[in-house]
Amino acid sequence: MLFPTLDFALFFMLVFIVSWELRRHFEARKIVLLAASYFFYGYWDWRFTGLLAASSLLNFGAGHLLQRHEEIGTRKLIVGIAVGINLSVLGFFKYYGFFLDSLTDVLVRFNIERDLPFLEIILPVGISFFTFQGISYVVDVYRREVKASTSLVDLCLYISFFPQLVAGPIVRASEFLPQLTAPPRLSRAQMGQGVALILVGLFKKMVIANYLATEIVDKVFFDPSAYGAVDLAVGVYAYAIQIYCDFSGYSDIAIGIAALLGYRFQRNFDQPYRAKSLREFWRRWHISLSTWLRDYLYKPLGGSRHGKFATYRNIILTMVLGGIWHGAAWTFVLWGVFHGVAIATERFIVQLVPQRTYAVAGYGAGKVGRILELSDSGGRFIAGLAGFFLTFNLVCFSWILFRSTDMETVFMMLQGLTDWSVGPELATPFISLLVFGTLAAQFLPGRWVDKTGIYLSRLDGITLGVVLGAGLLFIEAVSPEGVAPFIYFQF
Amino acid sequence: MAAKKTKSIQLKTKNRSRRAGSKRKIILNTPEKSQPGAKKSTTRIPRKRNALGVKRVARIIRKNVSETEEVAKPRRVAINKALYENSPEEFDAPWVIAYRDEPSEEQTSRNRGHMLLAILVATLMLGVFNSNALVSWVRGLPAGDIEDRIISTTEIWNGWMEKRGLDEYMAAARKYIENMKEANW
C-alpha cells in the first residue's frame, strides 16, 4: 500500500477515526494500531508478516533476558546472539543471491564450475529498516540506555508501526517507547505539522521525483550512450534531486502521519544539499541511518579515540557497511568506499589547515580591524561557496555509482560526460526548473515547514480542510500519471 | 473571575469545575501578565535538576501566591517535567501538573474533531473537483453487486460534476503543465 494512493487514504482515515475513538483505552488503541500495521505490511505480501512477528518476538525476548541478567558475560552473549540472528536474517534475504552471484563470477574466472544452490528469494519490504530498529533496541537495553519493554504489544508496535515500517525513519526505542506508555494526545501543533509535512512530502514525491524519474533519469541511466554530456550531467543532478525528494518525501509523509496519530518523530533530512562538507552532508542526509551507523558501528569500532589511522579506518569501514546496507551490488559497495575515503580525506585536510587566529584574538579597532573582519567574512563566504559546490558535485558523482545497475553503466556515464558536442534533448526548461529550483529551495530557512505547520495549526477545521483539499488537488493535477514506487523500498 | 485566597495554597486555574475537592490544574507555561496595576511576576525556574531544585520550585510557586493577594488570572510557572517526577510529593494535592505543549484530554477531543472535519472537507473537495479519479479507482474494485452499485453511483456523481464544469480546473492545470513540459530552449 503506497502512501499516495486512495487505498492508503481510506486506510488511514479509518485508522485515525478508530484510534482516536479509543484514546481513553490506550491499550486497546495500541492493539488496533498494531493490527493496522500488520494489515499495512501484509497488503504487500502476507507471508512476511510472520517474519515481522518473529523479529519482534526475538528482540522482545532478548531485551527481557538482558533486563534479568546482570553478569557482563551473559549480557554480551545475549546481545551477541540477538544481533547475530537479526543480521543473519537480513543477510539471507538480502545478500544470499548477491553472494552466490559473486562467488560464481570468481569461480568462472578460475575455470571452476560448480552447481551452487541458487534460490529465488523475495526481498521483504523494509527488512533493512525494521532489522536495524530491532538491533538498536537490543543494544540500547544492553547499554542500559533504555529499559526493556515489559509489554509485547508496545515492542511489536515500536518495530512495526506502519508510518515508518517500510522506509524509515529508523526510530530509537528511547524516543518512541515512552510515547507508547503515555496517554495519546493530539495538539494543534501536531495537526498543523502533520498536514504541512504530508502536503510537502506528497509534492516532493509525486511531482518532483516522479517527473525527474520518468522524463530524464531513467532514460539516461538506461542507455547513457544515446545522450550527450549536457543531458547526462543534468540527468545526474536530476537523480540527486529525485532520490532526495523521493526519500525525504516519504519520511515527511511518515512523520506527518505519525504526528496526526499523536506521535513525534525526529526529522530525517535537513536540507542536505546545502552542506559545505561531506561530514556536514551526512549530518543532514538520512539522519536516522547516519546516527545509527555512528552509535552502533563507528563508536563500537573505536570512533576517533585510537589515533588518526584507526579513525580513518573506522570511517571507511562504517561507510562501506552503510553502502552494503543499501543494496546487494558492487556499485553500492563502491559508493560506500567513495564516501568513506572522501570523508577521511576531508578530515585529513581539515587537520592540516591552520586555525584562524583573528576570530579568537579579535580584529582590533579602526580601519585595519574592519578590513580584516571584512576580508575574513568575505573569505568565509567564498570558502562556504566553494565547499557547497565541491560537496554537491562529489555527492552527485557518488550517485552515479548508486544509481547504475552495473559498472558498465558507470563507465558509459563517465565517458559520456566528456562528450559536449551534442546539445540537450532531455534537459528541457521544465526539467531544469525542477532540478535547480529544488536545489535553490535547499537554501530556504531551515524550519520553513515547521513554521508553515504553526500557521496551519491556527486555522479552524473547515479552513484547514480547504487548504488540505486544495493542496491535494494541486498535487494530483500537476503530477504525472501513475504512482512510481519509492526508491528506498528496495532497501 | 477573581478568586479569594484561602489557607491552602491554590492558584486560580482554568479548571472551571469548582466542586469541593476537585483538583486544580496548573497550566505550566511562561508567566502570564497579571491584572492591570498588579506587579508583573516573571519567575524563572531553573531547568536543570538538582538536589534542591524541586523544593526550590515549590517554594517559588508558593511565594507567587501570597495569602492576601487576589488574582484574576492563573499564575503560571514553567516547570521541568523531570523536576516534578523526581519529587511529586512536593507538589501535593490538589495540584495537577500539566506540562508545557501537552494538550489536555478536552483539547485532544476538540483537536480530533477539528482534524476529522478537515479530512471530511478535503475528501469532499476531492470528490467534487477530481471525480474522474474516483471513477477510475472504483472500476478497479472486484466484481460484485455492491461494487457494481458503487461504480454506477460514482459514475452518476462524476456525470453531475462534469455537467457543472467542476472537472475543468484539474484539466486546465494538467494542460498547463503539459505545455510547460513541451517548452524548449
Image: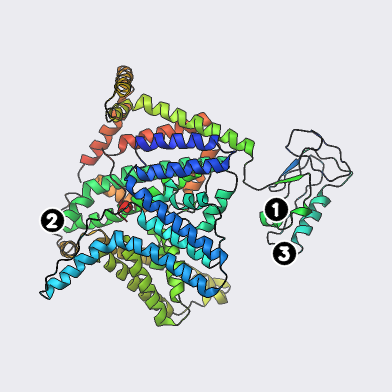
Residue mark closest to the camera, 3 vs 2: 3
| Residue A119 found in image quarter | bottom left
Residue underneath mark 2: A422
State the residue in front, A51 or B122. Answer: A51
Colour style of the rendered protein structure: rainbow
Residue at 70% across, 51% down: B78
Looking at the rendered structure, the secondary structure element under dot 1 is: loop
Q: Looking at the picture, which amino acid does disc 1 mark? A: Ile
Q: Nearer the viewer, mark 2 or mark 1?
A: 1
Q: Which mark is residue B79?
A: 1
The residue under label 3 is B50
**Residue type, label 2:** Val
Q: Are marks 3 and 2 in contact (CB under 8 Å)?
A: no
| Marks 3 and 1 belong to one chain | yes
- Give me the residue at 22% from left, 46% from top: A215
* Chain identifier of the residue bearing label 1 in the image: B
Q: Nearer the viewer, residue A319 or B41?
A: A319
| Image-based side of A107 in relation to B105, left or right | left
Q: Chain of mark 2?
A: A
Looking at this view, is A16 or A241 the one in front? A16
Q: Is residue A70 visible?
A: yes
Label 3 – label 2 distance at C-alpha: 70 Å
Corner quadrant of residue A420 = bottom left
Amino acid type indicated by mark 3 = Asn
The N terminus of chain A sits in image quarter:
top left
Q: Which mark is on residue A277? A: none
Q: Position of residue A439 (x, y in %)?
A: 35, 53
The answer to whether the residues at label 3 and label 1 have Cβ atoms under 8 Å apart is no
Q: What is the distance, in whole Å, between disc 3 and disc 1 at their CAs?
A: 13 Å
Q: Secondary structure at mark 2?
A: loop
Rendered image quadrant of residue A339: bottom left
